[in-house]
Image (cartoon, grey):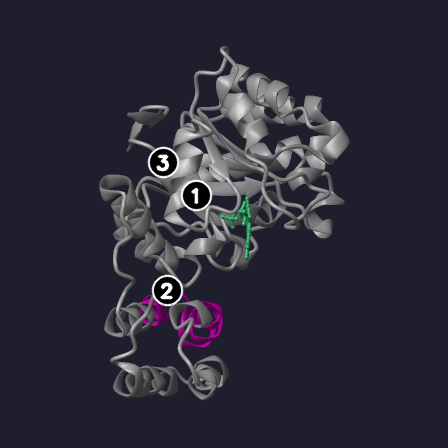
Amino acid sequence: MVKIGDIDVGEFPLLLAPMEDVSDPPFRALCKEQGADVVYTEFISSEGLIRDAAKSVMKLDIYEKERPVGIQIFGAVLESMLRSVEIVEASGPDIIDINFGCPVKKVVSKGAGAGILKDIDLMVSLTEAMVKHTKLPVTVKTRLGWDHDSIKIVEVAERLQDVGIKAISIHGRTRAQMYKGEANWAPISEVKNNPRMHIPVFGNGDVNSPEKAVEMRDKFGLDGAMIGRASIGYPWFFKEVKHYFKTGERCAPPTMAERVEAARRHLRMAIDWKGEKLGVFETRRHYTNYFKGIPNFKEYRMKMVTSDDSADVYAAFDEVLEKFGDHQFV
Ligand SMILES: Cc1cc2nc3c(=O)[nH]c(=O)nc-3n(C[C@H](O)[C@H](O)[C@H](O)COP(=O)(O)O)c2cc1C
């Protein structure tokens, strides 16, 4: 059984990756229902939190039904990170996660996210201070290194463990790679095989089929898989992987009725949480995947992604169910 601190997260847990503008409460709820064992919020700026910026604060919202849930924060300034730990703690997550992997320029240029991979001593000292500042388990999500010539993840993971983190998730790419090429899981496996490591090591990057999850477990010997893009608009991915673990076979994909129902609930929860305008707008990115592979679907997708009124989007869902209800997904 894998544990993050005292939290039992099951055998080879599947973790929903933190994803900006994606891993919000409605989406996390859907993934949880479909078998995600741990869910993470999208990253939250420590500077935004201490300024009480509304957008950052709203991202702290969590619901009982999604536990265990980790709130992810990023930053590079000690005082802001410590103050953020206090703010995050007050919203009652099970885990605090530190983002040391975000590759985007606006984050990296401030020394945060993957930017800190250029200063491992700072990464370790910041982590140590945060661990000491909270009773909650602290986890880290990071990448292999800054670039191909600076992959020191075995040493980095060990040092982070030594200052008290309770699990590490590693995306098998460097910052220089951004999202290009293929994720390399071999260095993550090296971290796991380090005899000094005793905390869970979760692999991340390109787990987009049940077979890949099996490979991560059996060939690379990791403790769990963190899943990002494969779940966007497809929360069933968690269930499919678990079914495959159990039976060695793929289960049938969700039917059109299930997809429409999920899209409808997603939209409803999003509107309940952030209001009509934002709810309608921010759920749009999921529809392409909910309805992937349906021929001649463009007209309907356009309705879903251009309507500002939820009534029109719900009507489009009804139309889709009526017209494509018999579509066989493969
Ligand atoms: C839209 C999007 C937003 C992301 N936002 C975050 C984030 O807020 N925090 C983070 O640690 N990683 C973020 N990531 C990276 C993912 O957590 C994950 O590491 C990456 O997508 C690789 O995993 P995958 O191949 O399963 O998608 C984001 C990725 C995507 C596609």
Occupied quadrant, residue 30: bottom left
Query: Alpha carbon of mark 2 to alpha carbon of mark 3: how far?
Result: 21 Å
Location of residue 271 in the rendering, given as x and y in whole percent from the top left corner: 37, 71
Residue ID at (54%, 29%) = 188
Q: Nearer the viewer, residue 158 or 209?
A: 209
Circle 3 residue: 94
Residue type (three-letter) at the residue carrying disc 3: Asp
Q: Is residue 202 left or right of residue 78?
A: left
Q: Is residue 34 magenta?
A: no
Q: Are marks 1 and 2 in contact (CB under 8 Å)?
A: no
Q: Where is residue 192 in the image (x, y as percent from the top left)?
A: 49, 22
Which disc, if any, is residue 273?
2
Picture quadrant where residue 235 is located: bottom left
Q: Name the residue under label 1.
A: 212
Does label 1 point to a residue whose CB lies under 8 Å from ligand 1? no
Q: Please tell me how crowded label 3 is: few (under 14), some (14-19), or many (20+) other residues with Cα within 10 Å.
A: many
